[in-house]
Image (cartoon, coloured by chain):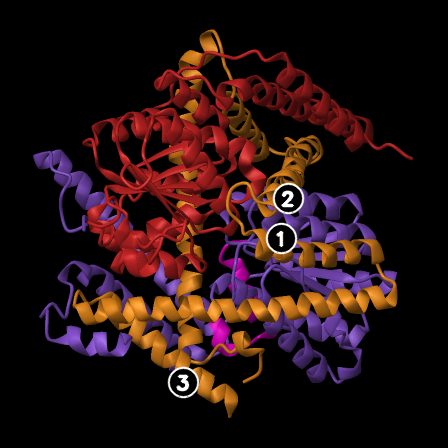
Chain colours: A purple, B red, C orange
């Protein structure tokens, strides 16, 4: 039925391109071109230095601490994201790295989540990391579990796990909402070392107060590249930086141009408004 | 049981909020520009305009969300707007339906002509995009399982171009999805949100991607002042103010103890 | 091989959805509508995965004797709510709604309310004027906090304006910068997914 409708509608309207979206198309094409260039061009893929991020240097310490104390490590991606969200993907990339280490050190990794699809993907990611580390027998599927899709049922569930299991280290990496401080404060009350990172600007302030280390916004996206040294991820970090410079230049030119225009003829309209 | 400092802090807050809530004292508040903007936006809408009201929240935030929702719905019904309710979070469905029905009753609004409740759709992004193409295709029937075309209010509604905007009642970042995906269809977005989310939405409000926002108990209390009706917002303000002052006191005490400790160490 | 098929499907749909955004043609709209419809259908099936995982996990833990009371309570809730919904429905006045409004809502509100207690303890412990920037941050926070309360007398004259200025200028500038960074991070991650460079969403591997 839907496909018949699609074919039937082809003949009705000639508006193949929405001209109002031209600026977005130009911006998208430029961004895609830069990402493709940094990813596939050989000279661009040569090694470059990523600045040190304290939270990422602490990952090793957090895993080591849990191993020494013979207590589990808890990792949760927050309630706010689903599998299609880039932040969740970045968090799962980090999980792969952390899981490989916990497999090697024989440290128990507990991963509660609010989303069934994230649970399935995380099970695969962790299983593969354990295989990669050479210890597939140490993988415990039941430790990667679905708690609840409801925000505070999830928060209560994870809080309960933190209180009962008393993990030595807690990783709060992903999209968090109001549950962030509840989890971080509970983690703090049991004396766990906490590494957090999120794309929710409002929750960052809570994490900074309650956690030992915090990855701010895009640092989370760079984290997996930093830890794994994966060239394709590092290439996209470089693309982000180039795009950031482009945006900064456009902003500066637009600011000066619009200020001059406003002073000279009192107009706030120009190429920068679309 | 060993009591730590934080337990005393918790007990102090519990007592303070409990006592101030029981006291029933209400406060007169000056209206903030944000709240005034929402009031003006609704006031300027012609009577009979159709406004979508999306209940994008969970049950947990009800004590804060309910006063905001009631104040906005009351204004909407009083101004003779036609309200079409829906929920993008499952838990908002029953709450949204109840709040709409209760408010409609206060104004003798009739179901089907003055207001309708469409119910819940999962996968919010898909639902928002889908409604941009066709509201009927997204909700073939209303919450009470009546066919879309059997309701007079819904019959002329095709997609977002037939409504004046959406009022998203949210306790999380859901409203950003209305801005990002509804914005593709030039849908105007209004928001009633919990106080914790204010700073998340500030950039959207400043850039004009969001038209107006009422936030937190304070916003609800201000709105109640504007529409001249009492409610939970005004009642809760004393408790909230006391809690804020308590936190300020804690911050000061924390800093005093920090500096004393530092001096001793030096 | 199975992963390659998934990558190809992802690439094709990524391309189509990107292209349809820039078209005003009814075909683009119907493609968008169709994908949105299927998206909702797929989500319903994904829930089954969660239900199976939830049951499996809880039964295993009950058998092992770990956290038994909590697990049993979860399983009881899992059975009772659908049964109530199937017998009496979920509309106003039904037992399902009674349980929702009188058990679930207060329980969830209680967990949400914990936030206030944790904000109090975190402010006491963490909000210290350790340096000049921290002291500036602290002062800004106090101004915002008071402005959101009931400020009387001379305070109510200028405090909201100062708070508004802080929110709309330094705070907004910082948040916009973070948002731009996040947006770029999202863009590059999404592109990696569409191009098949990033395969974590398939459970990892190359």
Q: Residue furthest right?
A: B1
- B213 vs A133, left or right, is left
Secondary structure found at label 3: helix
Quadrant showing the N terminus of chain A: bottom left
Which dot, 2 or 3, sits closer to the camera?
A: 2
Which residue corresponds to mark 1? C84
**Chain part drawn in magenta:** A216-234
In the image, residue A48 above or below residue C154: below
In the image, residue A164 above or below residue A92: above
* Residue depicted at 61% across the width and 45% down the height: C95
Chain ID of residue with mark 3: C
Separation of residues labelled 3 and 1 (CA atoms)? 44 Å
Which residue corresponds to mark 3? C8
Please report whichever mark, 1 or 2, sits nearer to the chain's N-terminal start: 1
Q: How many marks?
A: 3
Chain ID of residue with mark 1: C
Secondary structure found at label 2: helix
Check if residue A230 falls in the magenta segment. Answer: yes
Residue B98 visible (yes or no):
yes
Please name whichever residue, B113 or B182, is drawn nearer the observer in this view of the structure.
B113
Separation of residues labelled 1 and 2 (CA atoms)? 9 Å
Query: Residue A166: which quarter of the image?
Result: bottom right
Please name whichever residue, B113 or B127, is drawn nearer the observer in this view of the structure.
B113
Which residue corresponds to mark 2? C99
Disc 1 and disc 2 in contact, CB within 8 angstroms:
yes
Query: Residue B69: which quarter of the image?
Result: top left
Label 2 crowd (10 A; few <14 / some 14-19 / many >=20): some
């Amino acid at each position: 039925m839907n496909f018949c409708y699609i074919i039937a509608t082809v003949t009705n309207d000639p508006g193949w391109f929405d001209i109002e979206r031209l600026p977005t198309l130009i911006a998208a094409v430029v961004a895609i071109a830069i990402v493709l260039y940094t990813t596939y061009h050989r000279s661009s893929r040569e090694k470059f230095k990523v600045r040190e991020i304290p939270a990422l240097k602490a990952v090793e310490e957090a895993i080591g601490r849990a191993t020494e104390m013979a207590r589990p490590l808890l990792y949760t991606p927050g309630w706010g994201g689903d599998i299609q969200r880039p932040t969740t993907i970045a968090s799962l990339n980090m999980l792969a790295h952390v899981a490989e280490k916990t497999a090697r050190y024989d440290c128990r990794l507990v991963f509660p989540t609010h989303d069934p699809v994230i649970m399935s993907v995380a099970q695969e990611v962790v299983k593969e990391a354990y295989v990669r580390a050479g210890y597939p027998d140490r993988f415990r599927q039941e430790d990667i579990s679905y708690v609840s899709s409801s925000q505070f049922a999830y928060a209560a569930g994870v809080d309960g796990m933190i209180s009962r299991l008393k993990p030595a280290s807690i990783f709060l990496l992903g999209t968090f909402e109001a549950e962030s401080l509840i989890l971080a404060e509970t983690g703090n009350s049991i004396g766990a070392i906490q590494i957090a990172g999120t794309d929710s600007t409002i929750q960052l302030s809570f994490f900074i107060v309650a956690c030992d280390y915090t990855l701010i916004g895009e640092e989370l996206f760079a984290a997996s590249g930093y830890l794994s040294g994966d060239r394709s991820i590092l290439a996209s970090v470089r693309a982000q930086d180039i795009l950031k410079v482009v945006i900064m230049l456009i902003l500066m030119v637009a600011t000066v141009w619009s200020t001059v225009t406003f002073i000279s003829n009192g107009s706030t309209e120009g190429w920068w408004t679309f | 049981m060993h009591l730590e400092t934080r337990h005393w802090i918790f007990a102090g807050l519990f007592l303070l909020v409990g006592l101030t809530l029981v006291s029933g004292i209400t406060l007169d508040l000056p209206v903030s520009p944000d709240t005034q903007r929402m009031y003006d936006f609704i006031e300027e809408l012609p009577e009979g305009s159709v406004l979508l009201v999306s209940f994008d929240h969970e049950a947990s935030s009800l004590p804060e969300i309910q006063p905001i929702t009631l104040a906005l719905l009351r204004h909407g019904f009083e101004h003779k707007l036609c309200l079409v309710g829906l929920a993008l979070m499952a838990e908002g469905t029953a709450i949204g339906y109840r709040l709409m029905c209760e408010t409609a009753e206060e104004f003798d609004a009739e179901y089907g002509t003055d207001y309708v409740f469409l119910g819940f759709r999962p996968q919010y992004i898909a639902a928002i995009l889908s409604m941009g193409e066709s509201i009927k295709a997204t909700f073939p029937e209303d919450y009470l399982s009546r066919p879309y075309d059997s309701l007079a209010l819904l019959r002329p509604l095709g997609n977002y171009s037939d409504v004046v905007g959406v009022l998203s009642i949210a306790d999380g970042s859901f409203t950003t999805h209305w801005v990002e995906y509804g914005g593709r269809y030039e849908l105007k977005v209004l928001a009633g949100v919990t106080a914790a989310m204010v700073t998340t939405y500030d950039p959207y409000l400043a850039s004009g991607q969001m038209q107006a926002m009422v936030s937190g108990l304070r916003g609800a209390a201000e709105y109640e002042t504007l529409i001249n009706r009492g409610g939970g917002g005004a009642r809760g303000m004393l408790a909230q103010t006391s809690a804020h002052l308590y936190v300020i006191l804690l911050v000061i005490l924390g800093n005093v103890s920090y500096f004393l400790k530092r001096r001793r160490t030096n | 091989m199975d992963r390659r098929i998934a990558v190809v499907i992802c690439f094709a749909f990524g391309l189509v959805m990107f292209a349809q955004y820039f078209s005003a043609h009814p075909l683009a709209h119907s493609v968008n509508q169709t994908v949105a419809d299927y998206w909702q259908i797929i989500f319903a099936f994904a829930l089954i995965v969660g239900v199976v995982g939830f049951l499996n996990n809880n039964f295993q833990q009950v058998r092992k004797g770990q956290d038994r009371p909590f697990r049993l309570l979860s399983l009881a809730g899992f059975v009772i709510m659908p049964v109530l919904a199937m017998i009496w429905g979920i509309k106003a006045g039904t037992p399902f709604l009674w349980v929702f409004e009188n058990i679930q809502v207060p329980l969830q509100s209680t967990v949400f309310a914990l936030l206030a207690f944790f904000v109090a303890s975190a402010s006491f412990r963490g909000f210290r004027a350790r340096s000049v920037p921290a002291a500036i941050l602290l002062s800004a926070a106090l101004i915002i906090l008071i402005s959101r309360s009931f400020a009387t007398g001379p305070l109510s004259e200028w405090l909201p304006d100062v708070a508004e200025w802080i929110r709309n200028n330094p705070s907004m500038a910082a948040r916009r910068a973070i948002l731009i960074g996040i947006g770029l991070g999202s863009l590059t991650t999404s592109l990696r997914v569409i191009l098949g460079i990033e395969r974590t969403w398939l459970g990892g591997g190359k």
